[in-house]
Amino acid sequence: MTVAQIAGSPDGMPLRIQLQHVERRRKLRAFTLVLPLLLFVLIGFALPIARMMFNAVYDDKLLTMMPRTTAALSGWDGKNLPDESVYAALAEDLRQAWAQKTAGAIGRRMNYELPGAGSQVTSSARKASTLSAGPYKAALIEIDPLWGQHEVWSLLKRGGSGYTAYYLLRSVDYQYGPDSQIVASPPEQAIFRDTFLRTLGISIGVTTLTLLLGFPVAYLLATLPVRSSNLLMIMVVLPFWTSLLVRTTAWVVLLQPHGIINDVLMALHIISQPAELIYNRVGTVVAMTHIQLPFTLLPIYSVMKTISPSHIRAARSLGAGPFYAFWMVYFPQTLPGIAAGCLLTFILCLGYYITPALVGGPSDQMVGYFIAHYTNVELNWGMASALGFILLAATLLLYYVFNKLVGLDQIKMG
């Protein structure tokens, strides 16, 4: 190879430029290979989450279905009932809603904030379709006293903007008052803060149990001979071969009043009558712990396999006892695996729906149950999105705090 070839190509291009072109082509090929996965993540994950977050703060049903009323209310001072021109706009919107068969959607949206308003709106639209001339204010109030209530007009005025904080407020047990002020929800409707706390408590409990059960098994797997550890590992990952629904249903069979567990306990005379092991917190935690145990165990095991047994032997040779050597030398090295396994289990537990629904009672349902309820039963996408948004924000916040704490601990250990 000549000096000219080393310095550059026959056409005079410097070697540095050639290397840059080669590196650019290599990066382009690498990007082309990961592009399908990137598109899949964007379309199947990022965009739905972005849409969910947008739905939590945006609802333009009243703005698009009652354009005249919301436009007329833009100049309303919010003190007394609106004037005749606003009622005339309302009458025209109701007539059009009845003709276009959108009165039900309007009533459903208003019913979210004013329970019972749905049927009244539909009935008013039907009767307003026969109104030919004013005065509309007295006529509409006579059709239904709903239109003489101040809070209805406050709701319609808020509907003049597509952006709303109602769903997020409702998700933390707050709502708008008669004058659009933010007030606490009535006690019979204030259920979501307790639900979030319950979800957090169950997730922490299940994570703790999986750590207490999984750490000894992971240590056993890491220290046993290969033949024995492989057999035990098959037993650990065996639940992954069956679906979540099948595993949960199996616990229903085991925990029911006349199931296997109660029959064995009664046969051994440990209990005299069947224990309540299902449709309560016990069944929920037991079933979730069984399902999540491998997710906590496997990261811990993977870290333990990298720890050299010579560390313990060195500590013992220097005079440390078995427990002291384990606690001061071996255990700190397993903390990255503990952190990864516990974080994975905790985040997965936050979104549980099927298991609490099948083996838990009414007071054991987590946030996922209400998200599914608003999505599939009530078709209230705003509330479902708001609950999902708050759950996602709480998860990211907890992850950030956890990551900071683990980072500080690692710095101190270093």
Image (cartoon, rainbow, N blue to C red):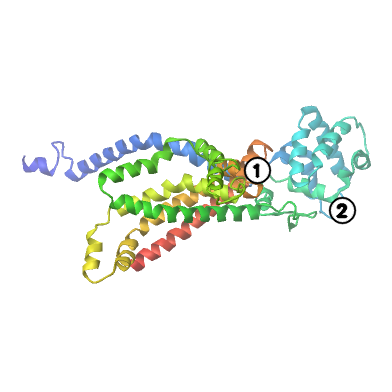
Quarter where residue 186 is shown:
bottom right
Q: CA distance from mark 2 to mark 1?
A: 30 Å
Disc on the earlier residue, 2 or 1: 2
Q: Quadrant of the N terminus?
A: top left
Q: Which residue has dot 2 on it?
A: 80
Q: Which residue is mark 1?
A: 382
Is residue 146 left or right of 5 when viewed as pictured?
right
| Most distant residue in the left direction | 2
Q: Amino acid at mark 1?
A: Gly
**Corner quadrant of residue 18:** top left
Query: Residue 369 vs residue 330: left or right?
Result: right
Q: Residues within 10 Å of mark 2 (few under 14, many from 20)?
A: few
User: Circle 1: is it few (<14), some (14-19), or many (20+) Cα within 10 Å?
Assistant: many
Amino acid type assigned to the residue bearing label 2 in the image: Asn
Asked if residue 302 is positioned above or below residue 101 in the image, the reply reads: below
Q: Against 359, is 197 above or below?
A: below
